[in-house]
Amino acid sequence: GAVVSQHPSWVICKSGTSVKIECRSLDFQATTMFWYRQFPKQSLMLMATSNEGSKATYEQGVEKDKFLINHASLTLSTLTVTSAHPEDSSFYICSAREKTGSHLEEYFGPGTRLTVT
Amino acid sequence: GENVEQHPSTLSVQEGDSAVIKCTYSDSASNYFPWYKQELGKGPQLIIDIRSNVGEKKDQRIAVTLNKTAKHFSLHITETQPEDSAVYFCAAGEGYNFNKFYFGSGTKLNVKP
């Protein structure tokens, strides 16, 4: 299957600072990527759909000015958590879909653990 | 929108036994049903999927069944091994576009040696 990488795997930052997380599709081009957030022992919560060359589509309740998404190339999407606060601490996971025949399969990155102190 | 329910939330089995996890969905437009395995501290890994034009798919010890009429699908793991211990998520959505997938709440599987 396709490979999606994330960097960094974990990050600790101070309250009020911004953090950028990168998501890359390593062996395929991804015009669309997805950003999820996962709290401990909970399911995946879709935050936004990242579209190459255009604005991201945010899910209801997700602040677009706080979670900035940039999808500047076919293999890279970035999520920037601006003015981070302790409540932003979470596990952030990106994904991308690869076309298999006429269908799309979704592959996830390894996730980024963000801790805001 | 779509609503995916997953049961049980936790499942404990003895090594070698079978494990079954069930999901139901509400939107008849959903035509793609993947299953993901997530180990602690890692991202979900696609382990098997099924599309609405088939009723069953098998890959070694893992199988998935789909009942479109009843709107439910199940993951079956036979001859379980301790390394199968993880959280499993089902999902439902449209497999031909980039619309969102809807995830179940997850099942924590514990395989006791």
Image: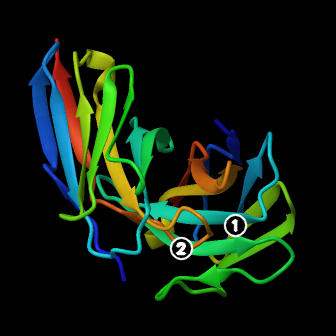
Residue at point 71% right, 77% down? A68
- Name which of mark 2 and mark 1 comes first in the sequence: 2
Three-letter code, disc 1:
Leu
Q: Mark 1 points at which residue?
A: A79
Q: Position of residue A102 (x, y in %)?
A: 66, 55
User: B14 or A104: nearer the eye?
Assistant: A104
Instruction: Report the label total.
Output: 2
For the view shown, which residue lies furthest in the front direction?
Answer: B53
Q: Mark 2 points at which residue?
A: A47
Is B101 on the left or on the right of A93, as rendered?
Answer: left
Q: What kind of element bears circle 2?
A: strand
Is A53 on the left or on the right of A116, as rendered?
Answer: right
Three-letter code, disc 2:
Met
Q: Where is residue B65 in the image (x, y as percent from the top left)?
A: 27, 44
Q: Say above or below: B78 vs A29.
A: above
Residue at point 44% right, 71% down? A87
Q: Where is residue A114 in the image (x, y as percent from the top left)?
A: 55, 56
Q: What is the C-alpha distance between the residues marked 2 and 1?
A: 10 Å
